Image (cartoon, grey):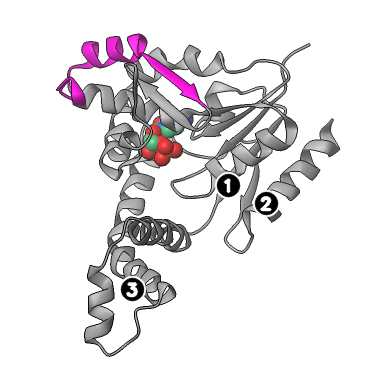
């Protein structure tokens, strides 16, 4: 019997990581975060100062990538790289390097190896189109760039407040406003939103316009615009689709 696979593809900040993880937990399936593999490869190439036109070295690095997953943590060359690979700079580098056919070819089998019983939820850009074309259920998650930028900016604001950012609190006090947590979060969110949206649009355009494995829904994918839905609602909807098929 073949291992059942659910693919979740979509653009930056479409919520696919959260949804894929919750689905995997609900079904007790394995989880593949393919973006983390491309990010880890980009991080390894940046660390080793490999130029983006050294195709042979980039492909060798992809084949030799020393990468382990431990839950949501990612270990690269024996060190915890979970936070390092999540920076926007590494995301953009991953987007650029992932357009190189030799890099994609070198990383393909590593991704397919995640398909193990009792099942797999695979999150990425080409899971339904290239890596798992026979997947039992293919979902393409999306929302407008503006909605995705609002979500990502909200995350950035929460991280900065948690890390003790006080600059925006000072700005609120100077404007005669009280520096509540909600006020701080909103001030930071509004400050970072334009840059975050510009980065999202740049990466969307790069991921959609490349010649190899461009980001697009598989012909047999179900497209879900989740702008108006909570992650829980989206997970419930996908679980319903899954149970209808099994
Ligand atoms: O999903 P993410 O933001 O972590 O992915 C980072 C980049 O990696 C993304 O901009 C394009 C590339 N990628 C890819 O080309 N194919 C995948 N299946 C996953 C990611």
Q: Marks 1 and 2: which is nearer the front?
A: 2
Report the residue marked by disc 2: 234
User: Does the magenta portion include 56?
Assistant: yes
Residue 45 spot, x, y in % from top left? 23, 22
In the rendered image, which quarter is residue 240 located in? Answer: top right
Q: Residue furthest front?
A: 164
Q: Residue at x 74, y 13 (%)?
A: 2
The numbered mark, 1 or 3, whose residue comes first in the sequence reads 1
Give the alpha-carbon distance from disc 1 to disc 2, as whole Å. Answer: 9 Å
- Disc 1 and disc 3 in contact, CB within 8 angstroms: no
Residue range of the region highlighted in magenta in the rendering = 47-70
Residue 150 spot, x, y in % from top left? 43, 63
In the image, 166 versus 89, the foreground residue is: 166
Give the SS element for disc 2.
helix
Report the residue marked by disc 3: 187
Q: Is residue 35 left or right of residue 51?
A: right
Query: Crowdedness of circle 2 by 10 Å Cα count: few (<14), some, many (20+)?
Result: some
Give the alpha-carbon distance from disc 1 to disc 3, as whole Å. Answer: 29 Å
Report the residue marked by disc 1: 141
- Disc 1 and disc 2 in contact, CB within 8 angstroms: yes
Residue 224 tag number: none
Q: Residue at x 68, y 53 (%)?
A: 232
Q: Is residue 58 left or right of residue 135?
A: left
The numbered mark, 3 or 2, whose residue comes first in the sequence reads 3
In the image, 126 versus 14, the foreground residue is: 14
């Amino acid at each position: 019997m073949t291992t059942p696979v659910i693919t979740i593809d979509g653009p930056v900040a479409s919520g696919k990581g959260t949804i894929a993880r919750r689905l995997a937990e609900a079904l007790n399936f394995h989880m593949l975060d393919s973006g983390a593999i491309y990010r880890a490869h980009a991080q390894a190439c940046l660390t080793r100062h490999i130029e983006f036109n050294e195709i042979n070295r980039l492909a060798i690095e992809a084949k030799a990538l020393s990468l382990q997953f431990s839950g949501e943590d990612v270990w690269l060359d024996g060190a915890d790289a979970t936070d390092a690979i999540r920076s926007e700079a590494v995301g953009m580098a991953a987007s650029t390097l992932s357009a190189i056919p030799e890099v994609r070819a070198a990383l393909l089998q590593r991704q397919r190896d995640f398909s193990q019983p009792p099942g797999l939820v695979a999150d990425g850009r080409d899971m339904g189109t290239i890596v798992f074309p026979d997947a039992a259920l293919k979902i393409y998650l999306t929302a407008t760039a503006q909605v995705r930028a609002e979500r990502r900016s909200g995350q950035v604001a929460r991280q900065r407040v948690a890390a003790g950012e006080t600059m925006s609190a000072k700005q609120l006090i100077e404007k005669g406003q009280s520096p509540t947590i909600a006020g701080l979060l909103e001030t930071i969110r509004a400050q970072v939103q334009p840059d975050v949206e510009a980065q999202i649009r740049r990466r969307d355009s790069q991921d959609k316009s490349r010649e190899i494995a461009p980001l697009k829904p598989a012909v047999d994918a179900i497209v879900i615009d989740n702008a108006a839905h909570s992650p829980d609602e989206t997970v419930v909807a996908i679980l319903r689709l899954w149970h209808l098929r099994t």
